[in-house]
Image (spheres, helix red, strand yellow):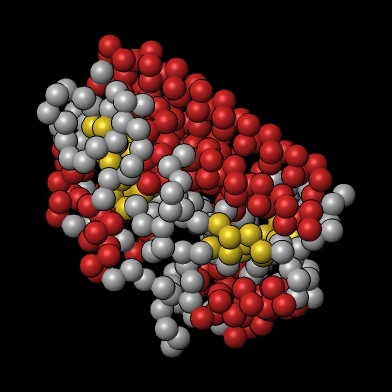
Amino acid sequence: MRPPRTRLTLALVGLASTATLALAGCSGGGSTDGTPTVVTSTDVWASVASAVAGDKADVTALYTSSEGDPHEFEPSASDTAKAADAQVVLINGGHYDSYLEDAPKADGATVVNAFDLLSDDEHEHAAEHGSESEHADDHAESGEGHAHNHGETNEHVFYDLVVVGQVADKVADALAEKSPDNAQFFRDNAKKFTEQIDGLRAKLAQIKRAHNGTDVAQTEPLAGYMLTEAGLKDVAPAGFTEAVEGGQSPSAADRAAMEDLLRTRTAKTFVYNTQAVDPVTEALLALAKSANVPVVEFTETLPTGVTSYIDWQSKQIDALSGALTASGNAR
């Protein structure tokens, strides 16, 4: 058994869980002045809620580390208490943040579940294409299905820009109910945010026009929804990505297949999750660089110093576009 992927120490986890996202309109704990309170699982979702809330609501994220793996986060008693006091609870859903899904909620609290906003078509595509890359050369027929999810729907819905825009609208509605005097303020902010989301989607459309059908490989199915919208095909072996996501050791066959994708440059870009790192993924990163396969580093939470969802994803999309162009695979 190989060493587990990089994990936070318990002390750091505790520190992260008590931190509050440093965004406009955010503060720790519950409000005593009638200001609505929002609790989210991660700082990514807090950045979405804060874009809507502005200075008219208090938004707190339970997990704010830019280094650890959110899948492995265990909340403290104080975290659970924050959720129990919140008037609006924003969860990712899909078992990504079960601790918040299962936490006690205040009477009258509104729960916004991002995963539940996936369309039926998205659920069906995800289930159908969950194991389409059992072999490295068994590529998908088209770029229209969702990326690997191992027979279940990909829970990383914060990379689904349509869902993120819908979440903003749901948060606006929830806050409007809690603070009717500011209802128009919240809805105006949500409209502005969704317009910015449309700008990100336009960037993905540009990538699709230039690189539709291009093969890429992820270390785990983090950005599957985004890659699909960009017309890209994740050809990484499903067994490999499933193992990495679960913190397990990929089989020798899956590892060899992944190495072959990079060594032969079948994968034109390597999408590397910097928060799910272990000796296997580090070795693949080195191989990609030595084979001159462009690397794009994606994250599950906001990088240090970044507080805006739009800024975060804009930079990542630009990096993806640059990597694809560098691979010389433009159409």
Residue 119 in view, yes or no: no
Is residue 50 placed above or below 264 in the rendered structure? above
276 relative position to 37: left or right? right
Up/down of 195 relative to 236, above or below: above
Rendering coords of residue 39 (x, y %): 27, 40
The total of numbered circles placed on residues is 0
Q: Residue at x 55, y 57 (%)?
A: 298
Query: Taking 268 as reference, is 3 left or right?
Result: left
Q: From the viewer's perspective, tell me whether residue 201 is left or right of residue 97.
A: right
Residue located 53% across and 63% down the image: 273
Residue at (27%, 63%) from the top-left corner?
13
Q: Is residue 76 above or below residue 165?
A: below
- The outermost residue toward the front is 305
Residue under the point 69% across and 38% down? 203
- Give the quadrant of residue 186: top left
Q: Position of residue 261 (x, y in %)?
A: 73, 73
Res 43 seen here: yes
Which residue is the extreme one toward the left?
32
- Residue 221: x and y in percent read 55, 59
Residue at the far right in the pictured view: 331
Question: Of residues 300 and 163, which is closer to you in this image?
Answer: 300
Q: Quadrant of the N terminus?
A: bottom left
